[in-house]
Amino acid sequence: MAKRNTTKATADRSSATRGNGLTAIMQSARDIFAERGYHGASIRDIAKGAGLSLSVLYYYHSGKQELLHALLEDALADYLRGCEQELAKAGDDPVARLSAFVRATVDYRVRRQVESNLSLREIRHLDPELLEQFVEQRDAVPRLLRQVIDDGVARGVFGTPYPDEAQRAILAMCNAIAQWYQPSGPLGVDELVERYVQLALAVVGHQPAAPATRARRSGSR
């Protein structure tokens, strides 16, 4: 029994070491790709930045292509999880769902600003097969937003006659946050979210109910 426990503890430590190594590689790749761009980054420098040998890095990734793809894919998965979690909490009200989508997107563009800009600048360096895989996964984002807009239009909550353009406009303005937002600036994330929610609602043609209308609806319940 003691031998089995010792073996398990050793395996657990080994697994933790591998996990820490992968985290260090991803962090180093993120920083070096952001600083030098894809062509300016080297596998050797990424390994050095992670405090690991080249052989350890190659254990996880075959080269820069695979490493860039993994970095972008990991960030995208984080974004999609955030969107799905916010939408799940929002219920079925179109206004609440659009607000939730915008909140998740703004949060992601601020929280993972570096990865957002890497996706814009460095995606062109992916080989066609990896690029196709990434774009296919990324296309889930506009589909989520379009479903929210279509539902709001169908229920008479959103008045836009141009749902395609509305979807593109909302994504474009939210995605651009990563290019200009300064965490040290005067605009906090909560205020930024509120502004962009109001902008998104204006884009889809949402007209808030007048106070008297809201009062009548409350009284009729």
Image (cartoon, rainbow, N blue to C red):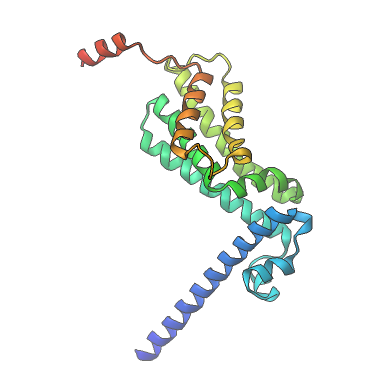
Quadrant hosting residue 136: top right
Quadrant where the N terminus lies?
A: bottom left
* Relative vertical location of residue 39 with respect to residue 13 in this rendering, above or below: above
Quadrant hosting residue 91: top left
* Relative vertical location of residue 72 with respect to residue 202 in this rendering, above or below: below
Query: Number of labelled discs?
Result: 0
Instruction: Report the residue at 25% width, 13% height from top.
Output: 215
On the image, the x and y values in percent for residue 99 come to 44, 30
Q: Nearer the viewer, residue 32 or 60?
A: 32
In this view, the residue farthest toward the right is 39
Instruction: Report the residue at 45% width, 21% height from top.
Output: 152
On the image, the x and y values in percent for residue 75 come to 57, 50
On the image, the x and y values in percent for residue 26 come to 61, 61
Q: Nearer the viewer, residue 122 or 184?
A: 184
On the image, the x and y values in percent for residue 96 come to 39, 28
Q: Nearer the viewer, residue 36 or 93?
A: 36
Instruction: Report the residue at 48% width, 46% height from top.
Output: 81
Quadrant hosting residue 174: top right
Direction from residue 126 to residue 172 in the image, left or right: left
Quadrant where the C terminus lies?
A: top left
Direction from residue 166 to residue 122 in the image, left or right: right
Instruction: Report the residue at 62% width, 55% height from top.
Output: 71
